[in-house]
Amino acid sequence: EPEVTQTPSHQVTQMGQEVILRCVPISNHLYFYWYRQILGQKVEFLVSFYNNEISEKSEIFDDQFSVERPDGSNFTLKIRSTKLEDSAMYFCASSVSTENEKLFFGSGTQLSVL
Amino acid sequence: GESVGLHLPTLSVQEGDNSIINCAYSNSASDYFIWYKQESGKGPQFIIDIRSNMDKRQGQRVTVLLNKTVKHLSLQIAATQPGDSAVYFCAENMNPGYSTLTFGKGTMLLVSP
């Protein structure tokens, strides 16, 4: 069964450093998303992306965050200068369309900012 | 504001029992709802969805009920198995027509053999 894959599974970084989280969405999907989950809390929406543009973003997705689809398969989330509070599990998701379609999630990248 | 913390509501059942997990959603305009299952260290896994023009939808061993009058969603799991132990999240599309989902806080289901 097709799945969303994310790398790395764990990332440890120093405060102030840049990190790039990588995702390979399901191949025939057109809509891509990043969510995050702080330990013990609910899954929070960060950003959605379609046709090489951001479709929606939340208040969490400030100027320190950016997304990119650098080629036909990868979808990345960059955090320019990490803060302690960026420590979380980051999930990538994709969907076929945006018209009330279920999202398929990857297994996540656990980001720890020290 | 909404309280956050490390403690999830927990439902403990015996193997073979039927489980009911409840969720209150936020937006009366939401027209699409999903239940996800999340096992430890994994991403959310789709269980079942329902659109707002329906009150009930059944899958394999699972049923979702939607009560729009009181903005309530429930997930029923028949003959619960130890492998069903996980955190269950309901999610709604706060922006009708879009798939951007807003998740609820989650309920932990513990199934004892």
Image: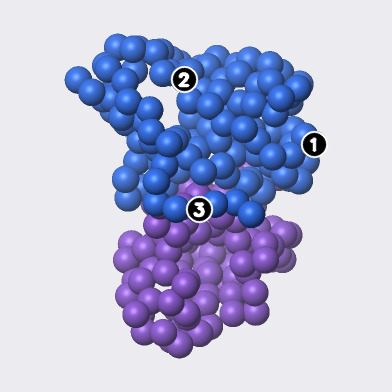
Chain colours: A purple, B blue
Identify which amino acid the numbered label 2 is placed on. Ile
Quick check: B106 above or below B111?
Answer: below
The foreground one among B105 and B34 is B105
Residue A40 in percent (x, y) is at 40, 52
The answer to which of marks 1 and 2 sits earlier in the sequence is 2
Task: Give the side of residue A49 with respect to residue B81, left or right.
Answer: right
Badge 2: residue crowd in 10 Å (few <14, some 14–19, many ≥20)? some
| Nearer the camera: disc 3 or disc 2 | 3
Q: Gap in Å between the C-alphas at discs 3 and 1?
A: 25 Å
For label 2, the residue is B20
| Residue behind mark 1 | B29
Q: CA distance from mark 1 to mark 2?
A: 24 Å
Which residue is outermost to the left?
Answer: B113
If you read the primary sequence from the N terminus, does the residue marked by circle 3 or circle 2 appear first?
Answer: 3
In the image, residue A41 sits, relative to residue B68, either above or below, namely: below
Q: Amino acid at mark 1?
A: Ala
Place residue B74 in its image quadrant.
top right
Q: Residue at point 63% right, 61% down?
A: A47
Label of residue B4 in the image: 3
Q: Earlier in the sequence, mark 3 or mark 1?
A: 3
Q: What is the chain letter for disc 1? A: B
Q: In this orientation, which residue lies closer to the viewer: A29 or B27?
A: B27
**Residue at the (53%, 32%) spot, across then down:** B35
Task: Tell me if mark 3 has few (under 14), some (14-19) or many (20+) residues whose alpha carbon lies within 10 angstroms of its own.
Answer: few
Asked if marks 3 and 1 touch (Cβ < 8 Å), the reply is no
Cβ–Cβ under 8 Å for marks 3 and 2: no
